[in-house]
Each structure stands twice: as C-alpha cells, then as structure tokens.
Image (cartoon, rainbow, N blue to C red):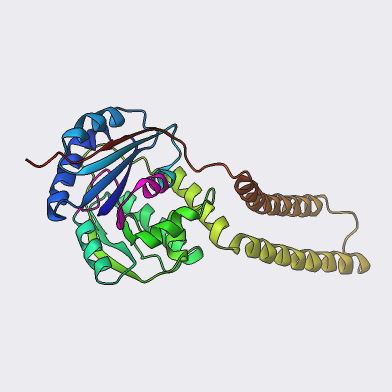
Amino acid sequence: MISLVIPVYKNAGNIPPLVAALEALNQRLEGELEVVLVVDGSPDDSHLLLAKALPSASFRSQLLLLSRNFGAFSAIRAGLEAGTGDYFAVMAADLQEPPELVVEFVERMKAGAEVVVGKRVGRDDPFLSRAMSSLFWSTYRRFVQPQVPEGGVDVFGCRRAVRDQLVALCEQNSSLVGLLFWVGFRRESVEYKRRAREIGTSAWTMKKKIRYLMDSMFSFTDLPVRLLTTIGFLGLLVSLVFGTVVFVGRLLGMIQSPGYAATVVVVMFFGALNCFGLGVIGGYVWRGFENSKVRPNFIVSGKQVFPPPAKS
C-alpha cells in the first residue's frame, strides 16, 4: 500500500479537483492508494468538504484534524505517523506538483531507492515568486544542506523504514527537508515542472520562509556562531587599530581634546555587536529550551477513517 500524506490549510477551493486527482491516481496505482489528509487548523471549510467527499471516494483515506495551526511540517509529520502503507509520499493540496509523481516515486522505490525527491526544473509562477523562491533555496543549499536540489523539495517519497526514522526525530522548530537528507539512505530524484496555481493563494509567505530558514540554520549548522566569532574578531582588530591611531595621535599632539564623535561611533559599534551576539546565542538557547520541554509537535483533535467502498 502507498500512503500519500497531504497537509491542508486554506484549500477549500481545491478540494473538488484534489479528490478527482486522487481518484485518478488510485486507478493508476491499481487501488493500492491510502490518502492521509491532515487539516492543519484551517479556518475555512476544508475539513467539512473533505468529510463529505471522502466517504464516497474509491480510495481508502484518513482525515485528521489538528487542534490548531501547527505548521505544514508538523501536519506532514502527523500524516506520516498515521499512514499504514509500505511506501509513503508527501505532496501539497494545491496540485501544483503533479500527483502522477507518486507513481514514479513508487516505481523507483520498488526498484531499490529508499528516498525519492521531486527535483523542480521549472515553474509556472509569477517572476517575483520565482525569484524569491530561487533566493530562498539557494541560501538554504549554501548554508544548511548543499545536497538539496536547486529548486528545493516540495514533494518526496520514502520507504516505511525511512518514515520510521523521520517520525522518531521529535525536534521542535526544525526542518523536515533537512532531516530527510540528514537521515541518509539511498536517494534518487525525479524531475518535474511545477504547475501554476489555479485556485487561491499560497499560505507559504515570505515571513514563514524566513522563519523556516532560520530554524533550519540553527538546527543544522553552526554558521551563526562562526559568523559571530568572525565579526567579533574583526571588531577586535578594528578597535586595536583605532586605539593605536588615537594613542599615536595623542603622543604627537595631533589630538588636543577627546573625540566625541569617535567615542559615540565606538560605543554604538560594540553595543550593536553585543546585541547581535546575544541574539545569535539566544536563538540556540531558545531552541534548546523548546526541545527540553518535550511538547508534542501537534495535537490531533479528530480522526476519521474511510475504507474504500466494497466491491460488488
């Protein structure tokens, strides 16, 4: 069985075409599809529409409702835990990633791959959206995980053994994509072109991207600490040079009175440097504190299971 996990947030308009696409996908997979839809505290009618549509669907499904919006990656983790298949796949509910990728994922995994990721080679999105996405993922690849494809990872498949390792990693404020590459295993990629979004707008805002990038950097690299150390070292050199110039100038009589402007500049520079350093250190301390609480990544407030209709 193939368990397909789909997080749902503000996707009410996408529900009818999504269910139709899953019906077609189930036929291609010869009835071996299980769909786990996780409504991530969506404020619209997504849960109600799914609850009405799934009982009559030809594929077996689970419908999970989280108690609030925990974020897409927590919703995916909830779906991975609930899935019962031998193979797993993850995709979005907006249908921008072709559902038929799941078929290719399963074929690759049956042939020996343990993890298969979708490698985006094009996208039918506005220029600004493409530019911001390219900037985000290039930064992610450079500073967090260089093995991630250039276009990022929005859809992937894995075997049950890999799923077990992912759900066992209960880190707070981390990166699911980063963890997927961190666990290793035999990995392959499938190229695809991202479709244009036909219904609604993306909830993946720039604010969320920046927050996700920061979580990823704090979770997978010590770059901020090394950057802080470098800045501190450069600041020390600047202060030594500046102090030497002032001392020599004083001995030569070039400085008759204390420099007010220079004092203010030095105080502001090192004050800002201290604040920056405290912010970096605080980022690591806060994330360590969050993990020490051992709170769950999500809370499931409702669950419905819909078996496929009996064959006549």
Between 21 and 119, which is closer to the camera in this rendering? 21
Screen quadrant of the N terminus: bottom left
**Camera-side residue of 257 and 195:** 195
In the image, taking residue 99 as reference, residue 39 lies left or right, namely right
- Horizontal placement of 162 versus 54: left or right? right
Verify whether residue 240 appears in magenta. Answer: no
Q: Residue at x 53, y 48 (%)?
A: 173
Total marks shown come to 0
In the rendered image, is residue 152 in sight? no
**Residue 72 placement, left or right of 249:** left
Is residue 1 among what the camera can see?
yes
Q: Residue at x 60, y 48 (%)?
A: 291
Where's residue 197, x and y in %? 23, 44
Place residue 101 in its image quadrant.
bottom left
In the rendered image, which quarter is residue 159 located in? bottom left
Residue 93 in which image quadrant: top left
Give how far across and how far down residue 6 sits, in percent. 31, 45
Give the magenta part as a residue range: 76-99
Quadrant including the C terminus: top left
Residue at the image point whose x is 22% and y is 48% from the top? 196
* Residue 89 on the magenta segment: yes
Residue 26 x, y percent position in the rendering? 16, 50
State the image coordinates of residue 135 (x, y, percent, origin top left): 41, 58
Q: Is residue 145 left or right of residue 188?
A: right
